[in-house]
Image: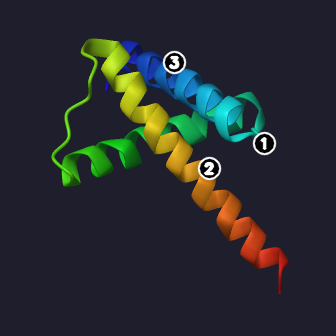
Amino acid sequence: MTIATMVLWVGIGLIAGWLASAVVGGGYGVIGDIVVGIVGSFLGALIFGSLHIASPLGGIAGTIFVAFIGAIVLLLLLRLANRSSHSH
């Protein structure tokens, strides 16, 4: 993996994580949003691939869109897990 690729993934992660935090609420700060966005990109790719759905956008915008959807799912799962752990 080149440095340019790593910077691209961090940038996509930051954008997707920040957007997802803005929609869902309760962000984790810059580093946390980057991690949520990067993990969300893998989760989004898994979801879209499993359902055989293509991104409605192409290029980087499509990658950010898929990562954004994955990051939203991840944040909702984290919120659900956090809620259930506090209820006991």
Give the Cα distance between marks 1 and 2.
9 Å
Rendered-image quadrant of the C terminus = bottom right
Tell me, what colour scheme is on the image?
rainbow
The x and y percentages for residue 46 are: 29, 50
Q: Quadrant of the N terminus?
A: top left
**Three-letter code for the amino acid on which mark 2 is drawn:** Leu
Q: Report how far apart the C-alphas of labels 1 and 3 lie in the structure.
A: 20 Å
Mark with earlier residue (3, 2): 3
Q: Image quadrant of residue 55?
A: top left
x and y, in percent, of residue 60 in the image = 34, 14
Which residue is denoted by mark 1 in the rendering? Answer: 26
* 15 relative to 25 in the view: left or right: left
Count neighbours of disc 3 (C-alpha within 10 A) and say few if under 14, some if 14 to 19, many if 20 or more. Answer: some
Q: In the image, is 57 to the left or to the right of 86?
A: left
Residue at (77%, 33%) from the top-left corner? 29
Identify the residue position indicated by label 2 in the image: 75
- Position of 20 with respect to 50 (left or right) is right
For badge 3, the amino acid type reads Gly
Specify which label sits upstream in the sequence, 1 or 3: 3
Q: Residue at x 26, y 44 (%)?
A: 48
Q: Earlier in the sequence, mark 1 or mark 2?
A: 1
Report which residue position mark 3 lands on: 11
The numbered mark at residue 17 is none
Identify whether 70 is placed above or below 65.
below
Q: Tell me which residue sits at (30%, 42%) in the image.
A: 45
> Is the residue 57 above or below the residue 80 in the image?
above
* Amino acid type at image mark 1: Gly
Q: Name the secondary structure under disc 1.
A: loop
